[in-house]
Amino acid sequence: MRSSEPPDAAGDSAAAVPLALPDGPLSMGRLVALEPAALRQLLTMGLRAGLAEPDLDACCAAAAPSLGQAPEQLRARLQERGWLRWDPARQRWRTRLGTDRPPAPPQV
């Protein structure tokens, strides 16, 4: 496209489409492929030291617009998927990889 040409309206509308979060458990491979980068950063920070409440709010506020959601909706969706959980021992929000597995049956 030349600089004198108007921007392609079809190309611009694709950027306005909200991005969907994938279903299923969070894996390291899925985490590094997530878009937008602000969402990857939120979940990566949760893996390391965890997130205090104000940090989680700020990260959700940064990532939510790219996903076409309100920050509260993004937070709720991450919790519903089990990707984000409160750790009472550390008093922080933590990213959770994998799924909750039932305990193994006792060995007899």
Image: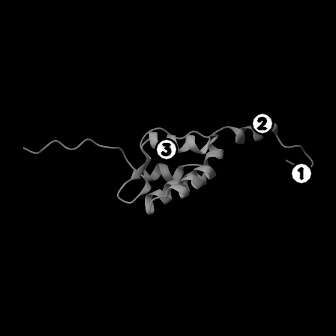
Furthest residue toward left: 108
Q: Quadrant of residue 102?
A: top left
Q: In this view, does 8 lie to the left or right of 28?
A: right
Name the spot of residue 85 as percent of width and height, x first: 42, 49
Q: Specify few, some or many for label 3: CA neighbours under 10 Å numbering under 14, 14-19, or 20 or more.
A: some
Give above or below for 16 relative to 50.
above
Q: Say which residue appears at 75% left-offset and 37% top-offset.
A: 13
Q: Specify few, some or many for label 2: CA neighbours under 10 Å numbering under 14, 14-19, or 20 or more.
A: few
Q: Say which residue appears at 16% left-offset and 41% top-offset.
A: 105
Viewport quadrant of the C terminus: top left
Residue position marked by numbered label 3 in the rendering: 78
What amino acid is at disc 1? Ser
**Nearer to us in this view, 95 or 88:** 88
Q: Specify few, some or many for label 1: CA neighbours under 10 Å numbering under 14, 14-19, or 20 or more.
A: few
Name the spot of residue 5 as percent of width and height, x first: 90, 45
- Rounded to the nearest angstrom, the CA distance separating label 3 from label 2 is 31 Å
Name the spot of residue 63 as percent of width and height, x first: 61, 50
**Nearer to us in this view, 82 or 88:** 88
Residue position marked by numbered label 2 in the rendering: 10
Name the spot of residue 77 as percent of width and height, x first: 51, 40
**Numbered tag placed on residue 90 in the rendering:** none
Give above or below for 53 relative to 72.
below
**Numbered tag placed on residue 3 in the rendering:** 1
Which of marks 2 and 3 precedes in the sequence?
Answer: 2
What amino acid is at disc 2? Ala
Q: In which quarter of the image is residue 106?
A: top left
Q: Nearer the viewer, mark 1 or mark 3?
A: 3
